[in-house]
Image (cartoon, helix red, strand yellow):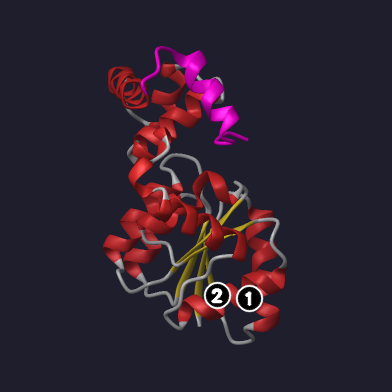
């Protein structure tokens, strides 16, 4: 089995490798520190599964996931994130992730998740399954942040974490004008007037750490 581990922290990649190598004795591991490395390796090599972090330098895990799905539609991608399920899980699964785990999950859960997704299944925790069912029930009456595109959602989270338009533009490698446009769209879609209202909403909904 070939497993690609994508995380910007070397200690996390090493820990994952130790956990997985103990169970998958003949596994071959590849590592990527950022989006660029991950996509280059997916393009050049075939992998049985990719384990992907949500938060990395440069492009976000959401965007990397979309690109991985485009490059290798049949390769399962298991998202392993420090963010709680209610922040990113539903969005990641809708984008095509084969499963979502938080980094607090036990090693055995990670092994079980990989076994499930490489055989064509999807892995979600019981609590997430319950949450997804409630999202389906409420689909007609979506929460305001559910109406946002993936990029708008990222901008919302960054504004709520106290970052300026200039800082967001730098981190996402976009122009200040583009970020201002995204901010305006977020305010309009969520029927809010300013950053303070956005921040209050994001904190209330547990959308920021």
Task: Quadrant for residue 108, please give it.
Answer: bottom right
* CB within 8 Å, label 2 to label 1: yes
Please report the bounds of the magenta region as a residue range: 191-209
Q: Position of residue 176 (x, y in %)?
A: 33, 18
Name the residue carrying label 2: 114
Numbered circle sitting on residue 187: none
Q: Is residue 47 above or below residue 81?
A: below
**144 sits to left or right of 184:** right
Circle 2 residues within 10 Å: few <14, some 14–19, many ≥20:
many
Distance Cα–Cα, label 2 vs label 1: 5 Å
The residue lying at 61 percent from left, 59 percent from top is 127
What residue is pinned by disc 1? 111
Look at the numbered disc 2 and give the secondary structure of its residue. Answer: helix
Q: Position of residue 55 (x, y in %)?
A: 52, 44
Residue 99 lies left or right of residue 187; in this view the side is right
Quarter of the picture containing the C terminus is: top right
Choose top left, top right, bottom left or bottom right for residue 26.
bottom right
């Amino acid at each position: 089995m070939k497993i690609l581990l994508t995380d910007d922290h070397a200690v996390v990649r090493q820990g994952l490798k130790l956990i997985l190598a103990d169970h998958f004795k003949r596994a071959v591991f590849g590592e990527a520190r950022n989006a660029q490395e991950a996509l280059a390796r997916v393009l050049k090599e075939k992998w049985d599964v990719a384990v992907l972090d949500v938060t990395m330098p440069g492009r976000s895990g959401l965007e990397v996931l979309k690109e991985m799905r485009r490059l290798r539609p049949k390769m399962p991608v298991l998202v392993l994130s420090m963010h709680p399920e209610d922040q990113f899980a539903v969005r990641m699964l809708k984008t095509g992730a084969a499963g979502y785990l938080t980094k607090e999950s036990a090693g055995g859960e990670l092994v079980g998740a990989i076994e499930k997704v490489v055989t064509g299944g999807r892995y979600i925790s019981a609590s997430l399954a319950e949450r997804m069912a409630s999202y389906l029930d409420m689909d007609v009456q979506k929460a305001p942040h559910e109406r946002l595109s993936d990029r708008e959602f990222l901008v919302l989270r960054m504004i709520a974490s106290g970052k300026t338009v200039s800082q967001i533009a730098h981190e996402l490698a976009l122009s200040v004008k583009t970020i201002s446009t995204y901010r305006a769209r977020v305010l309009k879609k969520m029927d809010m007037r300013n950053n303070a209202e956005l921040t209050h909403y994001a904190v209330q909904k547990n959308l920021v750490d």
